[in-house]
Amino acid sequence: MITFGVSIVVERAMACRLAVLLACLRAAHGRVAPRSRISIGLTEVEASMDYCETEQDQAAADGGVAFAFPHQLVDEEDLYLSGSAVNGLPLLVDMDRTLIQTDLLSEAANLFVAAHPAKLFRLCGWARAGRGTLKSQLACNTCIDVASLPYHAQLIQWLREKRAAGRRLVLVTAFERNVAQRLFAHLGFFHELLLTAGSGDTGPVNKLEHITARFPRGQFEYVGDSWSDMAVWQASRTAHVVSRSRRLISAVGKFGNLGEVFQPCAFSPLSAFARALRPHQWVKNLLVMVPLMASHHYADFAACSQALLALVAFCLAASSVYLLNDLVDVVSDRRHPSKRLRPFAAGHLRLLLGWCAWPLLAASSLALSATFLSGQFVGWLAVYGALTATYTFYLKRIPIVDVLSLAALYTLRIIAGAAAIGVPLSFWLLAFSVFLFLSLAFIKRYSELLRLTEGAGKGAAAHGRGYYASDLDVVANLGGSSGYAAVLVLALYIQDSHTLELYPAPHYIWLACPALLFWISRAWMLAHRGRMLEDPIMFALKDRASWLVAATIASVFVLASMPALG
């Protein structure tokens, strides 16, 4: 790279002539890079131009890529000139929660805690040292996947149109330089990256100072998203807003320069939070009611009340787990064809909200249990919470151990349900649950691997899991045999002496065995054909055949309970 520096001391009246001369040189010399910085002070003008020597340099020049750092530039009274000024004012675009529907600081902090949960106190120490220290330390200790970030598609399309029309696009961010540069390079359509991070914590005034040091007041347009951008919007020629807040949009409109308004997402924060709690998954917690039904205590009001309280406690605990799981898996979820639509992965919810909400839900669940339910139930609920946290951070990455953990989490609901109403847990119920839920857990993994095989081939590895697509046959064999073992346990249960005490006509239970064999075989057949959802329980809730099988099995047990048929 050959650099020509020209330092000329002139009067202010000569500044414009020099600018025109440089513009002519730019047009005449096709090898001049589009990066040129003209700083005009009271008595001195300094111009710097880069010439490209290689094809790579020429390609970079044609792409119009440039980096500008505010501390290298002059104050707001200086004149800013660029080669694209004839096509309109520069268009400045904020990064956090504007161009991307999240913020890089939260992304880095979430990534650090997910990878190093034991180092949470170190993160707190960086935060106490100041925002600048926190940003620099997180940038050094994490690697944000800029390709998978949730970008604002509508805004990006609009920016591309502006770029095609000849507008100069400037990306503005206060995050660390190396991360900002990677994101800048990934997008590829911005002309310039403007870093507004100073030596200390950044704020609205600091951002405005950095921007106006590069672009004079009223000589730029700005795209922002929050109240912290008010000062910049006021100083801009046109203010573009990315927000759902009518109050914010109205406040910006009072400046008289309101431009385009973009909606960040289709969901309100409240509805997004409700989706993140996954209330549709609460149906799994009905397993805590199984001991009540199996022990024939459904006519006992006290037992029913205790079981219902246990159900509520598990719903709160499960939602806290779902939030934690989505936070830890946010990167892998963004690479998944369907999970990328989850609220945290899609940027519909702030990551910080999730880290505040899940401990509150977990604490509420424990408080409810400790107040109204037995200490034994509280203990099992704590075991459930500890196992889910361990699964989220560690066990899900270990093959076989992960499906055993999933089966254990389902079975723990039944164990806790028995503890809630104070009845002994049946050996047969426990054995049946373990094998059945182990089969369902294998179906879940099988469906994920099958989708991976269709997309990347049998040699691909499941991201965030310990499986390869080539493990499909092994997973299918293990899962199918586990399901059939559950049917065997049910058949043996019919001959147990305790069964004769509960059911006057236990031989009718034999009819449940072929129904269950049909359902398990059909579930695996559908999974093999790629028609099974990655959550088999949710699939069963939407499947008519599953409802028919469930009704058949329930009818069989009703028949077995009728004394007249004994």
Image (tube, grey):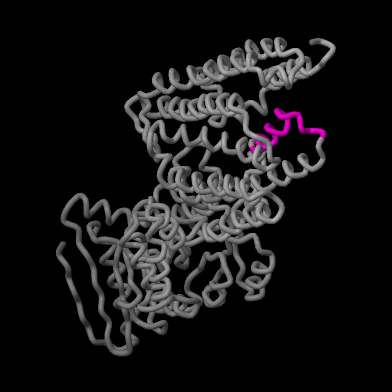
| Residue 132 in which image quadrant | bottom left
| Residue 215 in which image quadrant | bottom left
Asked if residue 312 is positioned above or below residue 39 in the image, the reply reads above
Residue at figure coordinates x 37%, y 55% from the top left: 116
Q: As rendered, which of 6 and 213 lies closer to the eye? A: 213
Residue 453 percent coordinates (x, y): 40, 25
Asked if residue 297 is positioned above or below residue 50 in the image, the reply reads above
Which residues make up the magenta segment?
285-299
Q: Horizontal placement of 386 versus 139: left or right?
A: right
Q: Horizontal placement of 397 versus 437: left or right?
A: left
Quadrant in the picture for the N terminus: bottom left
Q: Main secondary structure of the magenta part?
A: helix
Q: As rendered, which of 371 and 79 lies closer to the eye? A: 371
Q: As rendered, which of 383 and 450 lies closer to the eye? A: 383
Residue 384 shows in this picture: yes
Residue 530 percent coordinates (x, y): 51, 22
Q: Is residue 287 magenta?
A: yes
Q: Is residue 87 magenta?
A: no
Quadrant in the picture for the C terminus: top right
Residue at figure coordinates x 34%, y 62% from the top left: 139
Q: Horizontal placement of 501 versus 103: left or right?
A: right
Residue at figure coordinates x 41%, y 62% from the top left: 120
Q: As rendered, which of 173 and 7 lies closer to the eye? A: 173
